[in-house]
Image: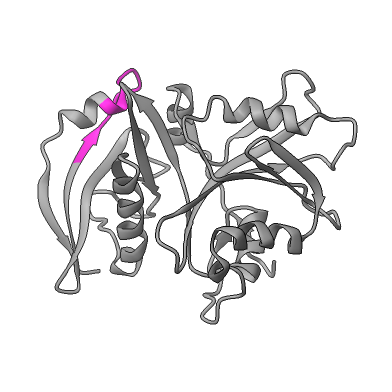
Amino acid sequence: MNGVERTEKEDWLTNYLFREGFWVGGTKLIDKRDPRTTAVQTIRYFQSEKPGFLVVYILEFIEPHNKDSNYEQFIKSKLEILNLDPDFTLAIWPNQSRFFGTLEGQIFRDNLSTVDVLQVFSNFDSSMVGKTTNLKPLNRSFTDFFHLWARQNLKGFQNDLDAFIQDQGTIHMLELKRPKESTQTWRPYRADSSNYINFLNFCVQNSYELTNIAYVASEPGKMKVFKDVSVEFQSLKYRSAEFQMKPHEKILNVMKNLEFREEISKR
């Protein structure tokens, strides 16, 4: 990819969230019945011209497709504990000529081509299919094979979920930002306003609680939390709070007791 590297998502916060029972994007899953079967999980949500969002659970398998492996059973076992109901599941085996599989409802198909998968997307919203005319260059990294594939084949808004957990009947969504500078000086960028607004709309439509968290990989426990992001006079307006979390503390409990202040970013 001409020097573009794959995004590294594992750090002190993602490891903490995984230990606490959060679903975490980029986590590697291993089939207990057949350890040869391993996959990296992500969830992406999409929106184009049709109202509402398309939610796709994606499993990118590390090993080549094995006709003796029960991929359907593996996928269904992960869906049973997901706490979300995706519109369909997409399985990917990179580096193969027909490297896709789908699970729609109870119907599993594999050995699918790009054309086959694009038809599944088109069934939800045909305006999603096609290469966008204003494709932005990859600056530093990509997240996974699907990220690269989608840039060439899908239009409209799309983004991946970072982490979530169901607590007392409510799903709490966490959007994670990893700035290079200190959380004391960092503020969200106006260029990311569409991401913040679309994710907020996505969470409102599904009755999810949304919290944005900025943190630095080299500063364990130190976080800046910001909520209710809106665009106002070409600036981002939101409520924020900074805190240092101890390893034994529960992040949801800590965030419930924070004192938020109004803040504006003109970056």
Q: In front here: 99 or 259?
A: 99
Residue 209 vs residue 14: left or right? left
Residue that appears at 48% across and 28% down: 18
Q: Nearer the viewer, residue 182 or 77?
A: 77
Q: Residue at x 47, y 56 (%)?
A: 159
Determine whether 110 is above or below 255 in the image: below
Can residue 80 be spotted in the picture?
Answer: yes
Q: Answer with the quarter of the image where residue 140 lies.
A: bottom right
x, y percentage for residue 136?
52, 75
Q: Looking at the figure, which quarter contains the C terminus? A: bottom left
Q: Name above or below for residue 54 compared with residue 140.
A: above
Instruction: Say which quadrant the N terminus sits in.
Output: bottom right
Q: Quadrant of residue 241?
A: top left
Residue 247 x %, y %:
35, 22
Residue 206's image quarter? top left
Bounds of the magenta segment: 242-252
Magenta-span inclusion, residue 246: yes
Residue found farthest to the bottom: 133
In the visual, does 178 lie left or right of 4?
left
Q: Nearer the viewer, residue 66 or 50?
A: 50
Answer left or right for 20 relative to 135.
left
Indicate whether 136 appears above or below 79: below
